[in-house]
Amino acid sequence: LEKKERLLQRNHIENLLAVKYITCSLHENDSMIQKMKKDSQRYTRIFHDPNLELSLWENKNWQPRVHFKSKAYVVPDNANAWDVLFSFEKNKYNPREHVILEKDLNFMQAQQQIPTQRATRLQVSDPQITQSSNNNVTIKFQTNSSGYLVLADHYYPGWKALDNGQATPVLKANAFQRAVRTGPGSHTIEFYFEPLSLKIGGLISLFSLLCLGSWMLWEKKRLFTPLLKPL
């Protein structure tokens, strides 16, 4: 039972990380390989080389890098979020329906900013990533319900977001990922990285330039001031 739970936990994390394919270099008789072969609901082996002892598996339950969830499973803090992730079968959290969110200031602000508007029948277009770099990810999608756009990238302080050009809080999702709350309609979501250290560095640079400019003006005035005063 313990090994089965570990396999379920591993598959759950793989789904959150948008892992579709898995390579294994284990012997055919290895216990993990045997369990993956039996777990046809989650894994399908699509390639196997007995000489290299190499297998390629497809994860049937994988989630795309960016996806929409209409429901949230709210927890008090990050420690509780990790607890839910690794014991999801023991509570009401459903990985296919919920995103785990921490009840912090950003969460409260997002709830006030965008009221709940549930559709009788949820309709969501597949979110499309139109731009992606280390410091910027832009996504477009449509929905007829309020909910959360989840990005499977790592959460870190300094990430900010725009929804159709308007600032919106970045939420810590699933203990280590990013999300934003959205209402019904068409959305262009832009995640961009703007750490506090960058702002501090800019202020220091500006202060240095001001000091340098003041010194140059003072030095210029000093050099061109006549040395002899008139009698």
Image (cartoon, rainbow, N blue to C red):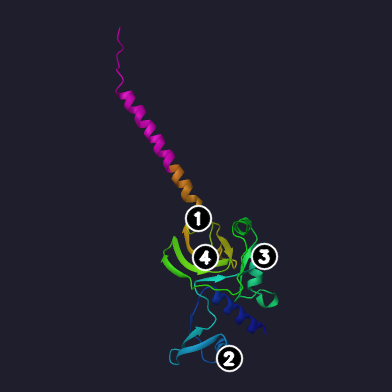
How far apart, in angstroms, are the residues tagged by discs 2 and 3?
34 Å
Q: Is residue 218 magenta?
A: yes
Residue with the mark numbered 4? 185
Query: Are the two marked residues, 2 and 3, in contact with CB atoms closer than 8 angstroms?
Result: no
Dot 1 corresponds to which residue? 166
Cα gap from disc 2 to disc 4, whole angstroms: 43 Å
Q: Is residue 41 magenta?
A: no
Residue 36 in percent (x, y) is at 56, 87
Specify which label sits upstream in the sequence, 4 or 3.
Answer: 3
Residue on which disc 3 sits:
75
**Residue type, label 1:** Gln
Q: Residue type at mark 4?
A: Gly
What range of the chain is rendered magenta? 205-231
Q: CA distance from mark 1 to mark 4?
A: 14 Å
The residue under the point 58% across, 73% down is 122
- Residue at 44 percent across and 46 percent down: it is 202
Label 1: which secondary element: strand
Regarding mark 2 in the picture, which secondary structure is present there? helix
Image quadrant for the N terminus? bottom right
